[in-house]
Image (spheres, helix red, strand yellow):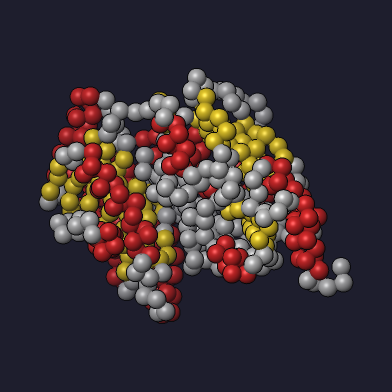
Amino acid sequence: MSTAAAPSTAVVSELVTTLPAGRVIDDPDVLASYAHDDAEWAPHALPLAVVRPRTAAEIQAVVRACLEHRTPVVPRGAGTGLSGGANAIPGCVVLSTEHMTEVLEIDGAERLAVVQPGVVNDDLRAVCAEQGLWYPPDPASSPWSTIGGNVATNAGGVCCVKYGVTRDYVLGMQVVNGLGELVRLGRRTAKGVAGLDLAGLMVGSEGTLGVIAEVTVKLRPARAPEHTVAGYFDSVVDAGRAVAAITAAGLTPSALELVDRTCLEAVDAWKNMGLAAEADVVLLGRSDAPGAAGDAEAAEMLRHFEAAGATFAAQAADAEEAEALFAARRLAYPALERLGPVLTEDVCVPRAAVPAMLGRIQEIGRRHEVTIANIAHAGDGNLHPLLITPIGDEPARRRAQEAFEEILSDALALGGTVTGEHGVGLLKRHGLEREQAPEVLAMQRAVKAALDPHGILNPGKVV
């Protein structure tokens, strides 16, 4: 090529020629909306083009064209990620699976579903419910996030305290690797140990090892109605003590979520739900044990709430009240975004360390003069401190970044991890280096080199 710009022009021309009309977008105004996911604090750039394929074969054609021209490919689902994993880099093609929205199969006998990667989480759950089945992984973004993105980040969620995360439900998938090969990984059977678990390797790889074109997931039978309990606390530390006590007692709630006053006030200001008037911190618990066992588990959670210092603790009067409480939990992040740029943490600590970690987060916020709101999948130790800065306040932004790094250090010091479910992306690369040994990082880079030898798949992310 005679100029640096020529390869870029060539790959876009090839994609336009190869793919059906309307698949390739290069309008700068539209490209800007694909420049980053919800981690807007992470670096991002305007992509060269956005491609929206509709089939596995079209994904393969995109990767092969980019491989030929050595053009980076950044896979993207709904763009709801919080670590910068889908952020565009200079000269890249963003490959969006948003139009691959078909539920291809629901097999009730085998309890599995086969879906395209752009299927929205809640849409799959709704289709399954029609057949008396249930897909458990339920990230807070479930009304918007897609199965492909959930698999790429190994998303968790509200009920993972009892039922596990996305990895626990992926049986197999179709993937296009960095050599442009369309391969089928995994299985459809309940058991299978033939060869290395390459499907499992893809889960949580954030588009660095392959582009997901289809996913086969396990399903469970529909569960009994849940009993919902709520406790109001004067401090996040008291609420954390309740969490630790519930864990120590051997209880396994189907959800145990924490929402602090800053979050409640933001939700009230947006949706006028009237939740912030009565509590500084709300702890929400659920039990889906059937019948009397569920009543007993709910009562036991309430007893631990009260023993930890709850100023009020009660079971929700009806399903409508229960859903309103959990709606506030799901709305907390978008409500806080309305106040200013939000830097989202995602540390996970041993459950016994939840009170100590919540106390450290409060102290870090005071010391750095940064507003930190707290939401958490408290039942499994996955905490989401949300650092909020006024728009345009650069000194506050720098303080928030310092606080962010200090929270990572404290989580590691308590035996935790720098990311429980959001992924490494761009925001946590330095944290990963602090958490894992050089030899372990080298092993991961070796896998990356084997499956993406030319380094075109989401370069610069994770490792």
Relative to 281, say whether 159 is above or below.
above
- Can you give x and y, in whole percent of width and height, for residue 146 in the image? 51, 46
Is 344 or 353 nearer to us in this picture? 344
- Can you give x and y, in whole percent of width and height, for residue 351 in the image? 33, 45
Indicate left or right for 55 with 219 as reference. Answer: right
Report the residue at 59% width, 69% height from top.
29
On the question of residue 11 being in view, the answer is no
Is 368 or 175 nearer to us in this picture? 175
- Quarter of the image with the N terminus is bottom right
Q: Residue furthest top?
A: 109
Relative to 334, say whether 214 is above or below.
above
- Can you give x and y, in whole percent of width and height, for residue 340 in the image? 38, 70
Report the residue at 72% width, 42% height from top.
57
Relative to 334, say whether 165 is above or below.
above
Report the residue at 78% width, 55% height from top.
17
Q: Residue furthest front?
A: 21
Q: Which quadrant of the figure has residue 307?
A: top left
Indicate left or right for 457 with 42 as reference. Answer: right
Report the residue at 37% width, 59% height from top.
334
- Quarter of the image with the C terminus is bottom right
Is 113 or 175 nearer to us in this picture? 113
- Can you give x and y, in whole percent of width and height, for residue 454 in the image? 76, 54
Q: Residue furthest left?
A: 311
Relative to 60, say whether 236 is above or below.
below
Indicate left or right for 299 with 3 as reference. Answer: left
